[in-house]
Image (spheres, rainbow, N blue to C red):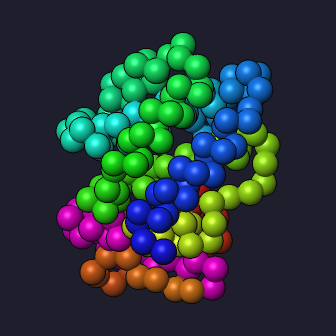
């Protein structure tokens, strides 16, 4: 599955789920991002898609950036926000912005947590996020001049970083993903 497929399938799963929610479910707090409701989480992922599409990613990840995404969509009906997101997704090429894919897949899991549902993004999505995140972690370890890290995920050992590992982490893929 390529990045475009991962992003679009994540969008479809989240959109379908959110479109059916009652107002009290849209107002539910998201445990993974406790300052947001479900509706605000959707405002954020919509904002990320819009910002990626319009190349407004200089402040990506900063609290002000995410707050502006939520604020720009505050008070709008969820159907309208979902329409905006769908329009962005139709034009967006996530291949140039893999962080957009990672953000959506992680927030898809956050949504499940908010709704008390024990599902997760599909196995291939979790695996892609882990590969992406561990590659980024390896880069950061190397830039900081730190020893590598041995990570055992679901019984498979990985070495993150270019130097001999100084520590070992053992975790199931879902826990490491979260």
**Can you see residue 167?**
no
**Magenta stretch encompasses residue 91:** no
Would you place residue 123 above or below residue 108 in this image?
A: below
Residue at figure coordinates x 78%, y 48% from the top left: 117
Left or right: where 98 falls relative to 143: right
- The answer to which image quadrant residue 113 occupies is top right
Would you place residue 121 above or below residue 157 in this image?
A: above
The spot of residue 9 in percent (x, y) is: 55, 59
Q: What range is drawn magenta here? A: 134-155
Residue at figure coordinates x 63%, y 85% from the top left: 155
Q: How many discs mark residues in the rendered view? A: 0
Left or right: where 175 falls relative to 119: left
The spot of residue 116 in percent (x, y) is: 79, 43
Viewer-side residue, 147 vs 124: 124
Viewer-side residue, 148 vs 8: 8
Quarter the C terminus occupies: bottom right
Left or right: where 154 falls relative to 1: right
**Magenta stretch encompasses residue 137:** yes
Would you place residue 77 above or below residue 38 in this image?
A: above
The spot of residue 136 in percent (x, y) is: 33, 64
**Can you see residue 62?**
yes
- The answer to which image quadrant residue 64 occupies is top left
Residue at figure coordinates x 35%, y 70% from the top left: 135
The spot of residue 35 in percent (x, y) is: 56, 26
Viewer-side residue, 87 vs 175: 87
Residue at figure coordinates x 74%, y 32% from the top left: 21
């Amino acid at each position: 599955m390529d990045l475009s497929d991962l992003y679009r399938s994540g969008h479809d799963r989240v959109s379908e789920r959110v479109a059916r929610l009652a107002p009290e479910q849209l107002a539910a707090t998201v445990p993974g991002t406790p300052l947001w409701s479900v509706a605000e989480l959707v405002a954020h992922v919509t904002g990320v898609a819009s910002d990626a599409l319009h190349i407004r990613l200089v402040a990506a990840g900063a609290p002000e950036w995410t707050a502006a995404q939520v604020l720009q969509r505050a008070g709008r009906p969820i159907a309208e926000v979902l329409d905006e997101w769908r329009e962005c997704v139709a034009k967006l090429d996530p291949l140039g912005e893999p962080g957009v894919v990672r953000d959506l897949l992680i927030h898809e899991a956050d949504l499940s947590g908010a709704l008390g549902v024990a599902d997760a993004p599909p196995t291939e999505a979790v695996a892609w996020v882990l590969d992406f995140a561990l590659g980024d972690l390896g880069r950061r370890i190397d830039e900081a001049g730190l020893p590598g890290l041995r990570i055992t995920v679901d019984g498979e050992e990985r070495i993150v970083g270019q130097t001999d590992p100084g520590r070992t982490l053992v975790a199931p893929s879902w826990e490491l993903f979260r």
